[in-house]
Amino acid sequence: MNKNFLGFKRKDGSVGIRNKLLIISITGLTGPTARKISNLLQDTLFVDNPYGGGIIGEDKIRQDNAIIGFAKNPNVGAVLIISADPPKGDFIKSRLENSSKPIELLTLDECNHDAIKLLELGLRKGANLIRRISKNKREKVSLSKLSIGLECGRSDPSSGLVANPVMGLIADRLIDLGGSAVIGETIEWLGAEHLLENRAKSNKVKIKISKAVNFQKQFSQSKGINLLGNNPGHQNIEAGLSTIEEKSLGNITKSGSKKIEDVLQWGEKIDKKGMFLMHAPYYAPESLSGFSAAGCQVTLFSTGVGNSFTNHISPSIKYSANPEICGKLNNQLDFECSDVFLGKKSFEDALNDFWNFMIDVCSGTLTWGEILNDSSEVFSRIDRSL
């Protein structure tokens, strides 16, 4: 069993599987220009925060933590912050200085509020940062440095029967080597939360799991939401999943069998090894962004009927156990385990094949999501703006 991959060592002790310049617009006013800068520079990551003034309370905390988390992700080699709010830019930059990676801040104010000038200076700063991090080289490192996000989307029965259990086996093996893994989608623990609670490391963690599920359940009830048709969605229902409980039983198999260390909030940093839960929305764009903000370098993402969306900062390995879909989505699925569903291959064989493919991706092999740029990052909101 391979226990290493080729990654980029960071000065803070983390290891990236990619080495990209992150261009992040932290204010809505600078988003269009920042996007132009990213489009004109080679192989960058672009994150656009469309919000700015008027964000208060927990939303502001979430927003700031997500920006900082995206920038600190080990896959980011350098950061260009673009802002229409100099104090906010200074605050974000100050929170990133301990990451010891190259960081530049550019504000609209210093360009005399001229977007064309902002574009010119942004191109120059960005180009210099790319040149600087291009000197970084991959080195052999232990998989104990890896944190993985575990996601499923547009699931069908093959997801819960085969694809997600294979993911759980990957998580177990990685944790045995000293790595970490996380699942989210709180509403998709509903009806199976007792199985997660039984694996809680402590009574405190057990209570956190119960509170998280009850919060989502009570919230949906307070809004008069009937989960059937909303989650599971119509694609899930047409594919053969009938209730949220049935979907949840398949979903939690992604978490494997290890003790659950803690329940994190959306985007909260993973600061130790082991298996974690993230109290977060179930929809893939928000869920995946919570993982990348938490520091995951890669996401394993199963699907039943197909789901092309991937994460931007943390490459998503898309795979399925549905034989029909595996035959159709050749430029969406990175890995197939339909032979297990058909009884032609064992779970152990699929585990080993998937393990080796994950190491290849961590060492530089591109996913279809990266090649086709089917990716984004989003900011999770819970309240209104002023």
Image (cartoon, rainbow, N blue to C red):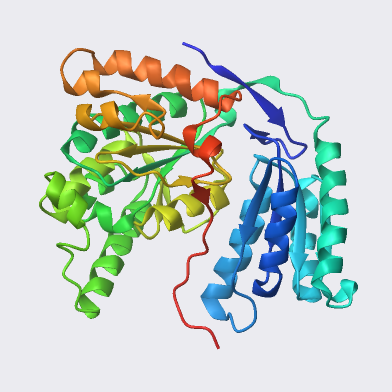
Q: Position of residue 76 (x, y in %)?
A: 69, 43
Q: Position of residue 158 (x, y in %)?
A: 19, 34
Q: Residue at x 20, y 51 (%)?
A: 235
For residue 7, what is the image quadrant?
A: top right
Image quadrant occupied by the C terminus:
bottom right
Can residue 153 be seen by looking at this rendering?
yes
Report whether 38 appears left or right of 369.
Answer: right
The residue closer to the viewer here, 112 or 64, is 112
Report whether 277 appears left or right of 229.
Answer: right
Q: Position of residue 21 (x, y in %)?
A: 73, 45
Q: Residue at x 35, y 34 (%)?
A: 258
Q: Position of residue 318 (x, y in %)?
A: 40, 35
Position of residue 214 relative to residue 302, above or below, is below
The residue closer to the viewer here, 161 or 182, is 161
Can residue 273 be seen by looking at this rendering?
no
For residue 305, what is the image quadrant?
A: top left
